[in-house]
Image: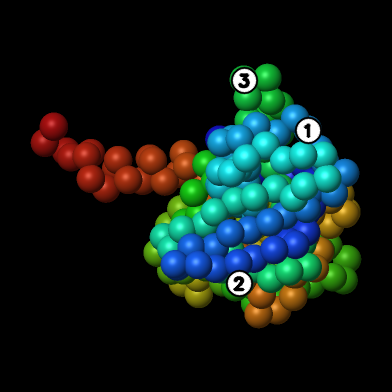
Amino acid sequence: MFTGLVQAVGRVVGADGAGGNLRLEIDPGAWRPRFEAGESISINGCCLTLVKAPAPDEPLLFDAIPETLSKTTLGALGVGTRVNLERSATPATLLGGHIVQGHVDGVGRVVGVNRDGEYRVRIGAPAELMEFVTPKGSVCVEGVSLTIAALSPGEAWFEVTLIPTTLELTTLGGLGEGDTVNLECDIIAKTILHHAQHYSRADR
């Protein structure tokens, strides 16, 4: 589990494919907590397993399998790409964002960026995800917990506003029209709707 509060921005230093898998090497910069082999780390909102505990000067190593690559933007990462990083939450973690699983629901596309005054990004989402996007609700974009500022279910888009801190501490300030982003909808909204659709019946 994660919170959607990015802890560091890393940089891809290796992206090698073999047998349909992808080995990612990520330089976390000065962010060097005591990493443990097998722990979960969010890479642009996608939960991946750390292959081994790195030495102080080594990159972080992850393997992405075909299922992950087919559902996320990770397959498009190239050397030099900046990525949002977050370690999994603990019982002592401040939940300043929202509950994020690191299970990407789909890939969206940036359809507009307004930098005049309030900084807004409009994202076109897969139509099937829009039922989980609610006014003032939470959404995770590229691993960042954000609040829905506006939405159009019929046109399948929503907007988020970015504060200066978010622009400074994440990769979202670099988004431009046409860029693709990983999306994870609020787990609470997904659970409630799923139960209502499949298990709530008037005759029970």
Task: Label 2: state its secondary structure.
Answer: helix
Which amino acid is tagged 3? Pro
| Structural crowding at the residue carrying mark 1, measured as other residues with C-alpha within 10 Å and reported as few (<14), some (14–19) or many (≥20) | few
* Residue pointed to by mark 3: 91
Q: Identify the mark nearer the N-term, 1 or 2.
A: 1
Say which quadrant the N terminus sits in.
top right
Q: Can residue 133 be seen in this view?
A: no
**As displayed, is residue 191 above or below residue 185?**
above
Report, in whole angstroms, how far the alpha carbon at label 3 lies from the one at label 2: 34 Å
Mark 3–mark 1 CB contact (< 8 Å)? no
Report, in whole angstroms, how far the alpha carbon at label 3 lies from the one at label 1: 17 Å
**As displayed, is residue 129 above or below residue 32?**
below
| Structural crowding at the residue carrying mark 2, measured as other residues with C-alpha within 10 Å and reported as few (<14), some (14–19) or many (≥20) | few
Q: Which residue is drawn at 67% across and 37% down?
A: 53
Which mark's residue is nearer the viewer, 3 or 2? 2
Which amino acid is tagged 1? Pro
Q: In which quarter of the image is residue 123?
A: bottom right
* Residue pointed to by mark 1: 33
Can you tell which mark lies on residue 65? none
Q: Identify the mark nearer the N-term, 3 or 1.
A: 1
* Residue pointed to by mark 2: 76
Q: Which residue is drawn at 63% across and 58% down?
A: 24
- Tell which of 125 and 200 is nearer to you: 125
Q: Position of residue 26 (x, y in %)?
A: 72, 54
Task: Label 1: state its secondary structure.
Answer: loop
